[in-house]
Amino acid sequence: MKKQWWHEKVAYQIYPKSFMDSNGDGIGDIQGIISKLDYLEKLGIDILWISPVFQSPMVDNGYDISDYYAIDPMFGTMDDMDQLITEAKKKNISILMDLVVNHCSSEHPWFQEAMKNPEGPYGEFFYIKDGKDGKAPTNWRSYFGGSVWEKLPGHDNKFYLHSFAKEQPDLNWENPLVREKIYEMICWWLEKGLGGFRIDAIMNIKKDLTWENLPADGPDGMADVYKVSQRVSGIEKFLMEMKERCFDPYDAFSIGEAMFLKEDNIKNFIGENGYFSSIFAFEPCHAYRKGKNYKEYVWPQPFKEWREETFHNQKIIGNTGFEANIIENHDQPRGASLFIPEEDYGFHSISALATILMCQRGLPFLYQGQEIGMCNRRWKLSEFDDLETMSQYQVAVEAGYSSNQALEICRHHSRDNARTPMQWNDKEYAGFTAGIPWLPVNENYKEINVEKQEVQYGSVLNFYRRLIAFRKSEKYKEILTYGDFKPLYQEEESIFAYTRELEEKKLVLICNFSGQPAEITLTEDYENVIFVNYQQTTMIGKKLQMKPYEVVVLE
Ligand code: GLC
Ligand code: CA
């Protein structure tokens, strides 16, 4: 495999609204990020993905862009952005911005023009179609609930398509002019010295141009719009073009939000000449949902399903490329809450989860606050901000749940769990802002915060630092990056174990992911214990006696 500059890196995602507020308006901003670059450097981060900071009406927190060439004043100025890129570069940190090009904002001038004159050139920038007898052209359901079709204001029988909120009209990728505009914009940003992009919702850019109804999958008579993208072919033309025109010339790192990939497509996406450098491994995080509908979701994530999905993913990717391994992001509940039963939450369980993640094959991708073990918050209904959560609540109530049950479901699943302000210290509002934060801080900030963990050798934060340093150490980085992955001890109830192998070298990770002790009879000899989360490892002959949530890496 040809080596790439990003192969041995560790990445970190920032949700700018909630990371650090520099001017006391309660909203995180670019200067806030700059002020924490030392912190990120010390953690060992090389690649920083910043969720959208472009000009936006913020219906979906910046995933609705009204000007791709402007920074939203809420986050700062273009000078701030340039400064961030420059300062980060001094620390060998590459910045990724969020490329949201499946849709823009309904306030983008393109859409404003399209509304005025749908027959004109900007009408062709979107999918505008006549209704069927006054009704929506198809029965597709948007990701945030309700039809993907909305009446075009001021026009009787015209509808425009939006896969997400109605304020996020989908761009028409079939139109070569739209693609030109997008590529031009990507290159403009890369010229500034970005490391690359995370590419939002990209599997949705190819539509089914036959505009057929799909078999209904709910009482509303509609069908989820993601099924459309699964049915159609032809997306590869767009993705290849974008790669060749934009990413290749800049040797940029590109990571796609691509889900539901068929096995035989992996090579096309992240192989040597794939459309993207990498894609996120969502399947292990979504194991609790697999094959189930909303009502049957299990909480927390069932161990066996998670392990199985991880092994399956590792197997089908093999040495084809690198997926990015995550336990959480801004669209998910907190990983510590999802993967660990509440009564077991603590240093050992969190550090075990971290080690399992970080030693797999693939690019480790952290989300802000993960490194201190931030977890879900106990919400009141009125405190939620996210529009998807509102629709989750509605769906649950309509499915016959009581309001309390529906609230409980949202408490587990809401994206707002990941979006509470970063917990920097035990002062008011966790040191995130001198004003009033836009979203409530998690009440546990006095216990869980950066400042407190800084000074404790045995904190989650310092553990993450050692773990990242281990992953990037001269001695082990080759094997941890390129080594083959093989599952181990799969017949054991609560053991998550695998090997990494490169030429003559072999590492074995064994984790007892449960609150009960466990004993494992080793099948092979080992030379060294090289990484642990307990001070002592108990080995009697070939028997490894494991404490709750103990993890060991052997050589
Ligand atoms: C992606 C983003 C999510 C956003 C959606 C629409 O899934 O991660 O936050 O709401 O796309 O842009
Ligand atoms: Ca601010």
Image (cartoon, rainbow, N blue to C red):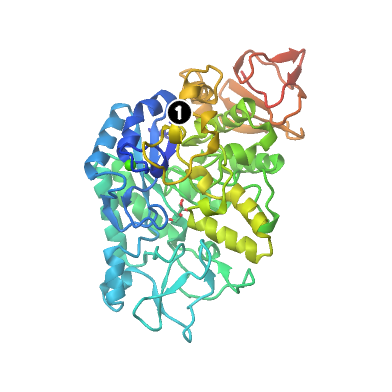
Determine the residue positioned at 26% across, 71% down. 113
**Viewer-side residue, 456 vs 165:** 456
Dividing the image into four equal quarters, which quarter contains ligand 2?
Answer: top left
In the shown orientation, is residue 283 left or right of residue 427?
right
Res 543 visible = yes
| Residue denoted by label 1 | 425
Give the percent coordinates (x, y) of residue 194: 30, 40
Q: Dot 1 surroundings within 10 Å: few (below 14), some, or many (20 or more)?
A: some
In this rendering, the answer to whether 301 lies above or below 90 is below
Give the percent coordinates (x, y) of residue 221: 60, 74
Give the percent coordinates (x, y) of residue 167: 39, 64
**Viewer-side residue, 440 vs 410:** 440
Res 1 visible = no
User: Which amino acid, by three-letter code, is at mark 1?
Assistant: Asn
How many numbered circles are shown?
Answer: 1
Find residue 483 and report its image quarter.
top right
Find residue 183 and report its image quarter.
bottom left
In the shown orientation, is residue 337 left or right of residue 73?
right
Query: Could you say whether the residue bearing mark 1 is in a helix, strand or loop?
Result: loop
**Viewer-side residue, 304 vs 4:** 304
**Viewer-side residue, 506 vs 369:** 369
In this rendering, the answer to whether 165 lies above or below 94 is below
Give the percent coordinates (x, y) of residue 13: 43, 39
Find residue 67 and report its image quarter.
bottom left
Determine the residue positioned at 60% across, 22% down. 506
